Amino acid sequence: EHLANCNDKKLHAAYKRKKLAEAKKKEDKQARVAMEQDAGGRAAWEFLGADNSNMWLLPESQVRRLAQDYGLNLPEDCSKEEAIAAVVRHRNSLDSSKLLMDAGAGPGRASKRRAPVTVQSLPSNLHRMTEAQLRAVCASHGIDPKKGSRKADIIAELERLSQPAQTLIEDAKRPRKAIKAAATEDDDQEEGVAW
């Protein structure tokens, strides 16, 4: 209140410097925290084996840095999911050139292989993730969900792909109503279990 009624230019200048210093200090702290989080995300990913299927754990800045390390030129406007997909394709092409060539893959062409989707390679909280996070999980497994896919569709596809082959064969033989009934029974039994 005093500053509003004050005509002293030195006091106004000192107040302005003080506010600028506080803003700079806050900005520096936020940048430091962001850098620590980025480094922590990369370290966690590397600790887990730096596997393609866990690349969704990386912050976008680290995915872009990884792409840069591989010499990939990503467009500025590409999303995290697109960046992950590009890095995964590139890493797959490097893997296939070290091993026997995959059918259809050759020098300069990315392999069409994708990481196997297993219960262990998927996050346990799929249903709590956002659609963007789920798309990142898909990209890290080499899966490209359809453009109009909703969150529920993406989860269903990931869960379907993570089922063991034998379960898929058995499900194909059973009528849809029996599968729904079995799923409902499993849900009812889980609700009664005390953890």
Image (spheres, helix red, strand yellow):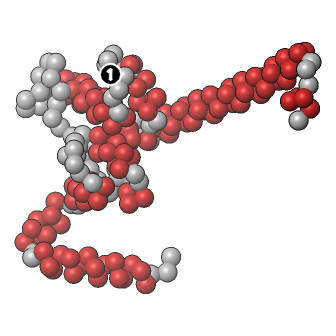
Residue 58 drawn above or below residue 93? below
Q: What residue is pinned by disc 1?
A: 75
Please give the name of the residue rendered at 31% of the width and 55% of the height, measured from the top-left corner: 151
Q: Residues within 10 Å of mark 1 (few under 14, many from 20)?
A: few
Q: Nearer the viewer, residue 160 or 46?
A: 160
Report x, y in % for residue 142: 24, 40
Q: Is 39 situated left or right of 170 in this image? A: right
Residue 140 drawn above or below residue 20? below
Q: Amino acid at mark 1?
A: Pro
Report x, y in % for residue 68: 38, 19
Residue 30 visible somewhere in the drawing: yes
Residue 156 drawn above or below residue 63? below
Say which element carries label 1. loop
Residue 87 image-quadrant placement = top left
Please give the name of the residue rendered at 33% of the width and 29% of the height, measured from the top-left corner: 78
Please give the name of the residue rendered at 72% of the width and 24% of the height, measured from the top-left corner: 24
Please give the name of the residue rendered at 72% of the width and 27% of the height, measured from the top-left corner: 23
Q: Is 24 situated left or right of 113 in this image? A: right
